[in-house]
Amino acid sequence: MRVLVLGDTFSEATRRAALMQLLPRLDSTRIQLAIAALRAAPDDLIDVALKAPRVLSLGAARRLVGLLRTLNIELLHILELSAAFIGIAAARYVDLPISIVCERAPALGALTRLARGRYMAQWQLLARFVQRILAPSELVKRSLIALANIAPEQIGVVYPVYAFEPVAQADRAALGLAEGKHVALIVPQGYDAGYLQALDVLERLRKRGVDARLVVIGEGETFQALHRAAAQLNLPIRWFPKRADLPEVLAACDVVLDCTEREQLPEGLIAAMLAGKPIVAPRQAGITEVLEPNIAALIVTPADVSDMALQVSRVLQYESLAERLARSARRRANERFAPEAHSRAMTEFFEATIYSMR
């Protein structure tokens, strides 16, 4: 089966990385993949550049029609919304099935009435012209159903690949980490006030007599807010402002704590899962989707810092519990987020979409 992946500029690094992970792992006896771009230049990733001077280009649409016919394409898979108009026009002209990616969906409470209406109209229109929509999580799927009233069977879920290479062991001394127990906090780039609760958790742990230290990894607004808040406290905290340090730092830590207030797929926790680390996290929709409560992580009530401190201390105190959680987390991550799992799921998604037209 021949599939053409269509994008616009392919400027987003995570999108390019995911494709680079997918391409060598696809079973070529089942799926042959080609990649085209509207406005990006050809390189080692993109096979064909359609040389569109702008998003709406009749010349690029004609070239895409010719490409679909020349390559005997059986499915057009649209990666970027900015490529949707030309992609849908060309695929419908040659009567091909179409799938499109919805990379993220906003939380219902975060939208104004106008923004909600615009989002609903956009995806209701797209759903009329495409056979399948690809969502990166059940959370995004539920948002699409709720916000745009799209039929659940039209949406497929394929978890994204996380190209994270864990480190088996790390030199704590080389990282500047003192003796004792280390609690990792992987903060997002955008602002999330929930992570400030980690300072309270650390204080409670030390009052319990637990020789714990906080290790903060990340960059951006949350990292800076934590740094400012910690400056007023006398707490043992080690700061790592470079995400590139994450594999080694995770390997040196004993447990990973998450304090997010948001319902989203937790990329930092997925890295912790792949690294095989025990996790304590709040009961948020994105977290419970990827972490089996009390099997792959200890789940607490959001904002309950007392319970967070209690569960972190349990993990630090009971080695058998920490090992069980770590094994389950790594198994769960490999089942859903490893490159091989992603390529299998994408192959099944492509085949199901093509067969839907036969």
Image (tube, helix red, strand yellow):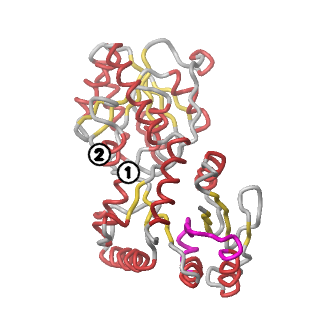
User: Which sits in the foreground, 97 or 341?
Assistant: 97
Kind of residue at disc 2: Gln
The percent coordinates of residue 46 (x first, y second) are 71, 61
- Which residue is farthest bottom? 58
User: Which sits in the foreground, 174 or 162?
Assistant: 162
| Label pair 2/1, CB-CB below 8 angstroms | yes
The earlier-in-sequence mark between 2 and 1 is 1
Looking at the rendering, the stretch of residues picked out in magenta corresponds to 68-85
The percent coordinates of residue 263 (x first, y second) are 33, 51
Kind of residue at disc 1: Gln
- The residue shown at (33%, 45%) is 289
Q: Is residue 281 above or below residue 261?
A: above
Quarter in which the N terminus is drawn? bottom right
The percent coordinates of residue 158 (x first, y second) are 45, 52
Q: Which mark is residue 264?
A: 1
Q: Which image quadrant for residue 66?
A: bottom right
Q: Is residue 300 above or below residue 213?
A: below
The percent coordinates of residue 353 (x first, y second) are 46, 65
Helix, strand or loop at mark 1: loop
- The residue shown at (50%, 73%) is 97
- The residue shown at (58%, 76%) is 87
For label 1, the crowd category at 10 Å Cα-Cα, with few meaning under 14, some 14 to 19 and many 20 or more, is some
Asked whether residue 306 is drawn in magenta, I would say no
Q: Is residue 38 above or below residue 27?
A: below
Q: Alpha carbon of mark 2 to alpha carbon of mark 1: how far? A: 8 Å
User: Which sits in the foreground, 333 or 245?
Assistant: 333
Q: Which mark is residue 284?
A: 2
Helix, strand or loop at mark 2: loop
Q: Which mark is residue 119?
A: none
Q: Is residue 93 above or below residue 4?
A: below
Left or right, 157 with reference to 101: left
